[in-house]
Amino acid sequence: KKYKIALIKGDGIGPEIVDEAVKVLDAVASCSDFSFSYEEALMGGCAYDIAGDPLPKETINIALNSDAVLFGAIGGEKWDTLPREMRPESGLLRFRKELGVYANLRPAVVYDELINASSLKASVVKGVDLMVVRELIGGIYFGEPKGRTADKGWNTMVYTRDEIVRIAHQAFKIAMQRSKRVCSVDKANVLDVSQLWRDTVIEVAKEYPEVELSHMYVDNAAMQLIRDPRQFDVMLTGNIFGDILSDEASMLSGSIGLLPSASVGAKIGVYEPIHGSAPDIAGQGIANPIATIASASMMLRYGLDEIAAAKKIDDAIKKALSEGYRTQDLAQFDAKEVCSTSEMGSIIAN
Ligand code: NAI
Ligand code: MG
């Protein structure tokens, strides 16, 4: 089997970290029964500079003709003064919408070796391994009516039953591959839309009798994530609650350079680190490639259904960390050897 991967390296550290993920993908392919071909596409500031558009049509076409998209990061000061629709970030939002990736998966894993990098006490975070499943293209960020006048502003949180059904299926399917627990987060004590959310999730749950479903109000969930994050396996939630909770959950793990994400639900998924283009360290060879390498693992697991290969990558990341290899951002946490971006990529690939 040959998988076609669209590579969107982007700006800043994007090219450096995507190159390391490709190294690791080729390594895992060399000991599996599949291979990869890559096609590069432009997005972000570099696309604006070359094509006058942060999201050229050709990029969408390349993505739609691939099996999955591996994405680096976009943006930088150079493009910050452009009008909104020409800015790199608007290219990315349009891209997700065009592909229709409605489910954003954000794992938060605490590696034992990096327990001191966490923002919380070791005794609270040891063994944390949770996944936020966030609805990405609906809810209050997109609902109508919306608007503002000089002294009034309004947005509307809208979810249809169909939108809730499809994101709930994503969460239950992922839970089946994990510890088979879903906690659905809403505000059903106050919001009508949340009551529909809760009723619909309960209905979908009937198709997954092995999965244990619980419900939590979002304010309590924010508190529980800090108090006892180990109680969670899959957290299922809407767009705005998921935005906030997934950022909160990401800080359980420590460095932003470790955290991957997947945006799925459509034919083609987008796999990317949660961090940005880190212009402050670009071009120095010191960026941590692990978030991107872990995103490539998510691509194998959730996009290509190559679960054994995904596990190989996850294990290789853990092994590199347990042997004490650290990039600059993690150098103060029990490092035996501080390595460059490309050294870390090679160590994990090997
Ligand atoms: P950022 O995530 O790029 O950087 C925040 C801090 O974390 C910086 O000090 C950076 O050096 C560090 N950092 C990030 N990734 C790292 C890695 N892999 N290894 C080591 N250190 C790392 O966020 P910031 O500075 O707010 O934004 C920079 C640019 O990136 C902006 O133009 C922003 O709009 C864009 N951005 C793009 C995103 C994307 O492409 N999905 C997401 C977030 C921001
Ligand atoms: Mg956010």
Image (cartoon, rainbow, N blue to C red):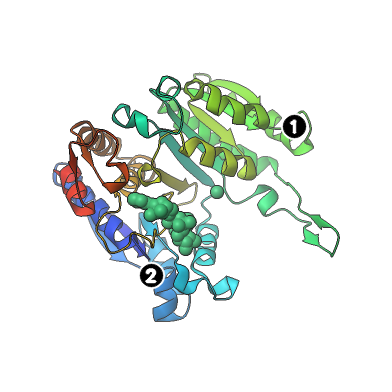
Determine which of the numbered discs, if any, sits on residue 290 in the image.
none
- The percent coordinates of residue 19 (x first, y second) are 25, 58
Relative to 341, 236 lies left or right: right
Residue type, mark 2 in image: Leu
Q: Does any atom of ligand 1 lie closer than 8 Å to the CB of label 2?
A: no
Relative to 106, 5 lies left or right: left
Residue type, mark 1 in image: Gln
Residue 221 placement: quadrant:
top right
- The percent coordinates of residue 303 (x first, y second) are 38, 45
Residue highlighted by disc 1: 195
Q: In this view, does 207 lie above or below 100?
A: above
Image quadrant holding the C terminus, namely top left
At numbered mark 1, what does the secondary structure look like: helix, strand or loop? helix
Mark 1 crowd level (few <14, some 14–19, many ≥20, 10 Å Cα) = some
Query: How far apart are labels 1 and 2 at the CA level?
Result: 42 Å
Mark 2 crowd level (few <14, some 14–19, many ≥20, 10 Å Cα) = many
At numbered mark 2, what does the secondary structure look like: helix, strand or loop? loop
- Tag 2 or tag 1, which sits nearer the N-term? 2
- Residue at point 49%, 68% (across, down): 88
Residue 213 placement: quadrant:
top right
Q: Does any atom of ligand 2 lie closer than 8 Å to the CB of label 1?
A: no
Residue highlighted by disc 2: 42
Residue 346 seen from this side: yes
How many numbered dots are placed on residues in this image? 2
Quick one: which residue is furthest to the front in this view?
A: 332
Residue 270 seen from this side: no
- The percent coordinates of residue 288 (x first, y second) are 30, 49
